[in-house]
Amino acid sequence: MRATLRWAHADLRTHRGEALFIVLATAGIVTSLLLATALFGYATNPWQRVFTQSHGAHVWIHTGPSADTRRLADVDAVESFAGPYPTAATAVESRGTRAAVELRGATEQPSTGRPLLVSGRWLDPAEADGVVLESSLARSLWAEPGDTLTVPGTARTLTVLGVADSAEPRYSPGERPGLVWTLPTAVRATAGRAGQVIGLRLTDPGDTDYAVQRAVTLLGAGAVTEVSPWQQARAEAQGDNRLLGQVLGLFGLGALVAAGLAVHGAIGTRIRGHLRDISVLKAIGFTPGQVVRIFLLQHVAFALLGAVLAGALTQALGGRVPGRLGDAVGVWQGLPGHTAALFSVPVAVVLFIAATTGLAAWRAGRVSPVPGLRAAAQRGGGLPRAARGALGLRIPSALVLGWHKAFTRRPRSLATIARLALPLLLIVVAMSAWTTIDRFHSRPEQLGLAAALTVRPDGGLSDAGVRALLDRNHQVTDVHPGIQVPALVPGQTGTIALRGLGTRRDPYPFSLAEGRAASGPDEAVAGQGLLDLLDVRVGDWVRVTVGAQPQILHIVGRSIEPENGGRVISTSLDTLRENDPGLRPTLYQLQLRPGADPHRVARELTTASHGRFDVHAVTNPADRLSPLRGVVAGLIAVLALIGLIELLTAIGGTVREGERDLLALKAIGLTPRQITAVTVTATGCTALAAVVAGTALGLPLAHWLIDAQGRSSGIGAGVARGPSAALLLLFGAAAVLGAAALAAVPAARAARRRLADTLSAAA
């Protein structure tokens, strides 16, 4: 054991850089996987916790005020219900921020779908205008208990008594109204659109679609205005946190495979370079098992050190990271499975690295105790015809010999290129993700975000009056009137958004990924989420119901829809007016001049309309994905470190294998500088081949992964954007030139070795 430890210590002193790289790479991989685990837990746990503690309803059904919703309590699948509650649609304002809300009349906190107070207190019958805000609405309004809200257009005020969490779909400006609990008398005193809502908790959550269909059939399709199932609320709550977790997990696993292969290659190269040392160890009494354990224990110790370091840093500092990652780690550390994950993830990584290390170390145990003489030259070893032709064209011999050296042993050369190409491939995928996010910011019109602002005027303004106010602002270039209403899908099991935007004379510029624009009567474009929900394709006809009125539309194109999970079908305002000639636009989508500040224009429009405009900037998904940039940068650093390990291994192997050729190269008249150029060229050719392979495979893989994520989120395929050609050329040039620069020093040192040293190395 003492001899084993002394040999391991001597080997560690010789390869300190390699050991440090393995430790850092393992730490980066384990950190990525732990953060991915934290984000997955953070994405699912908060909503699940609220749903469980509130005894949440599996579906909320909004109806007209006259519907007899109490009949739903007799449906077989219903375990319990909340409500029915009277509702009224209105708007509230706080500190200059306005939000569309749904007032819901309640007196006591129900047992099903119970709001969970996070601050303040519940409604008090003694305070007729007291309200409790849903937490996401309260954050948007910057409202706290004790604040006063105003109802635009009236002298009425509301007092915030409390803030509560709810498992229902959260507030989304311009898309979904916020939830406000108040007394029934306050709801009846509101002039907004009246209705009622009932929540159903089911005996089997998997039968939600069936239960909704039964409920709609019982009440009548004309009575139901909106259906909100629990799956939709959960998906919206998870949102981008789950995407971040998927990105971290995917790249963490890819980096783990790349690191395992890099360690495998490093050990294999070291074994080939230390055959005599291994033979000596066996000659003095080391068994094959002891030789295998030397290499195995060394690299397992490096991996274990990196894993422990990553776990300690994540546990101690993870919650202090600013932004969503820090919040995710803080929540994750309080979950029941936190300790198990903190232990199992590093252990799994160490075991994987140990498995790859064992495969390479097993070869060391097979080395003979009596080293054989190396052949002076390979069998059939002559320059190929292409190399001889290149020499005949007076191409420098160092370049020709370097290229020949890089690809002489095809199995070994291909294995080296494959190991080096894997981290480069993942870097290309990460760069594509970065480019796609940047494209959302720089070219939102290409990704379904042609409009920058949404204006919702109050009911007292005519269409001509709204347009006159909007035309006064010189930053507004195009105004597209429209309307968006909830509609029931065929089967009456869910609600989608039916949107009429623009006119046939002035169509709205939808971003189409498939098909064509809707230009004729009854033609529409739909998002990927709607196509998946209805199981239809471009070219099919669909029937949706708005209240009691059916709308039959021909889907002629698939649009990129970042809103509402892609569950949107869009047509022109003219098409909707064919069924209802008196239809008036309720919103206006505004396109601005390039470089205009949407928030500044929104303030100007609000001021010019004397508060009669509710103006919101169109939500850009890239704004919610800003933490992904830091994640991608960190992953690129980890992958670059793994690539550096593999590159140093390849350089070391090339230098060692070139020692036996040193005498021959000097004998044919090559100077030490030319011999150095041979090794540098061989390394550069290997790196170039890896860059070409990584780029050629990484670009289509990146498009497939990003589009697959787009399809699963409802946005749809067609959003992926690869890095520019200039960036790819810069990336490839940096990799090749960096490899050549790293190889220059060890190659020059080997080229200047004494002849006696060379003879002993070749023996």
Image: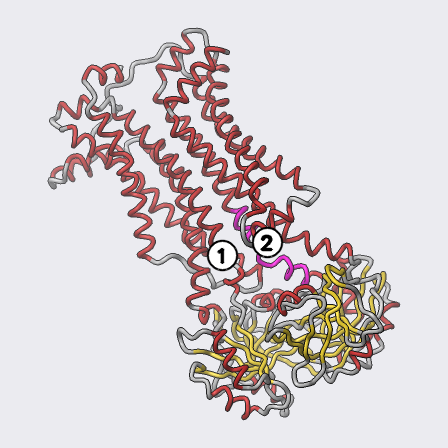
Image position, residue 593 (x, y; %): 41, 78
Q: Nearer the viewer, residue 271 or 619?
A: 619
What stretch of residues is rendered in magenta?
232-250
Q: Which residue is mark 2?
A: 242
Return the residue found at the far top.
284
Q: Nearer the viewer, residue 606 or 452?
A: 606
Q: Secondary structure at mark 1?
A: helix
Return the residue found at the far right.
74
Q: Which mark is residue 325?
A: none
In the figure, is residue 146 to the left or right of 521?
A: right
Image position, residue 687 (x, y; %): 31, 40
Q: Which mark is residue 706?
A: 1
Q: CA distance from mark 1 to mark 2?
A: 14 Å
Q: Amino acid at mark 1?
A: Ile
**Is residue 15 placed above or below 74 in the rendered structure?**
above
The local crowd at label 1, few if under 14, some if 14 to 19, many if 20 or more residues have their Cα within 10 Å, is: many
Which residue is at 50% across, 91% downward? 468
- Whichever of labels 1 and 2 marks the residue nearer the N terminus, that label is 2
**Is residue 42 placed above or below 465 in the rendered structure?**
above
Name the image quarter holding residue 615: bottom right
Name the image quarter holding residue 313: top right
Magenta: predominant secondary structure element?
helix
Return the residue found at the far front.
146
**Is residue 618 placed above or below 206 in the rendered structure?**
below
Q: Secondary structure at mark 2?
A: helix
